[in-house]
Amino acid sequence: MSMVDLPGLKNLIESISKERNLPKTAVQAALREALMKGYERYRRAAHLKSFEEDYFDNFEVELDLDEEGFRILCTKVIMEEVSNFDHQISLKEVQEVVDEAQIGETVVLDVTPDQGDFGRMAAIQTKQVLAQKLRDQQRKLIQEEFQDLEGEVLQARVLRFERQSVVLAVSSGYGQPEVEAELPKREQLPNDNYRANATFKVYLKKVGSGSHRGPQLMVSRADAGLVVYLFENEVPEIEDEVVRIVAVAREANPPSRYVGPRTKIAVDTLERDVDPVGACIGARGSRIQVVVNELRGEKIDVIRWSPDPATYIANALSPAQVDAVYLIDPEVRQAHVLVAEDQLSLAIGKEGQNVRLAARLTGWKIDIKDGALYDATAEHQKIAAIIEARHGAEEMDEPLEASSEEEETVVAPEDSTLDFQEERSEDSELVELEEDDPMTQE
């Protein structure tokens, strides 16, 4: 059998495997694919024609590591009459070697070209394809390694900067090789100092599966999942499921540079003897200070979750003192919050950040009102008119349904839910807050 010599083949495979952190089997598979593409280039040059994409599917490359070379093998079908010499072989020709050969059986033939015929262009094609196949193998291995780690927090080290992104080195575990990850501008924290070799904890947001250039992993320092992980790691009660995190609202990159990053986190517990807010803050703020330091001084408000929307909204506006909460339109989750004049700026926050985060945390649209100037009757009449107009429009949009006398239908009391909601909106729900303020870490 003929063979094309590849001096140093074994050392080449070993060096590529070590350099790119790939198993030798993956390097050999990439090399076989590249040599096959080189052979296709040789055939196109020899016959001065193009072939269909699947034309060479019955060809394969065999690597010989001992003799350091490769062969091209072709599987052909035995036929009475041959119409394509690359896919078929005549029965008469095969029976000269094997008398028992039958039509429809297959044989494997060595079709390796001569060493000198392979050509410089085929060698260049092989080199280019090999580089591409090695990159594809690396991406495939990274995807398999990290796809189950999406949503987890990893330790990262700064490598370099590309445009506005930071390229980091991350690892899936102890002893595993580092791979590159991208930290885009929108996922960075304004207070972070991304100097070379600086280490950070990052949230693995996405594992790319395409063949695009650049790092395949996208990480974040601005995702709320990072805050959740830091509290779970620092507060044993959360890890033991005594305290649970109900909701998190984070503004890591505020719209204005005059406002710093801030997070509100709502916690709760089923244990009567456990203070969930105090557990998260720790003695003299020791636990929450670890989280604040990792987030480079970000303000964090820990508040107590409540099943009562009014109480929950009041807690979410901490550190402001709330006098009362009107749930004026529960259907669209709209509330009016009354505060004293000296608490207005604190409740709204710098450029509206405090009320904006409270609205995200609770899922309610919150309007802050000065309690001394609030006209409850006028506001309630205005909201009642809006609700009535909305319900009227909904009733007009409902299609008419014909009822059959032969069918038996159970009908609920007409507009029972609607009447209850209208009555609740007109009367409005006023909750006077007498509880202590939730603890807050600024």
Image (tube, rainbow, N blue to C red):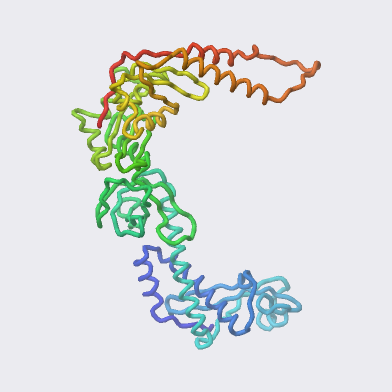
Q: Position of residue 19 (x, y in %)?
A: 34, 67
Furthest-left residue in view?
Answer: 284
Q: Does 209 sit above or below residue 368? A: below
Q: Which quadrant holds residue 247?
A: top left
- Please state which of residues 122 and 428 is positioned toward the viewer in this rendering: 428
Q: Which quadrant holds residue 75?
A: bottom right
Q: Does 370 sit above or below residue 8? A: above
- Please state which of residues 147 and 5 is positioned toward the viewer in this rendering: 147
Placement of the C terminus among the 4 image quadrants: top left
Q: Position of residue 119 (x, y in %)?
A: 51, 85
Side of 56 relative to 155 (left or right): right
Q: Is residue 242 visible?
A: no
Side of 323 relative to 97 (left or right): left
Q: Position of residue 433 (x, y in %)?
A: 34, 15
Q: Is residue 84 visible?
A: yes
Q: Does 227 sit above or below residue 9? A: above
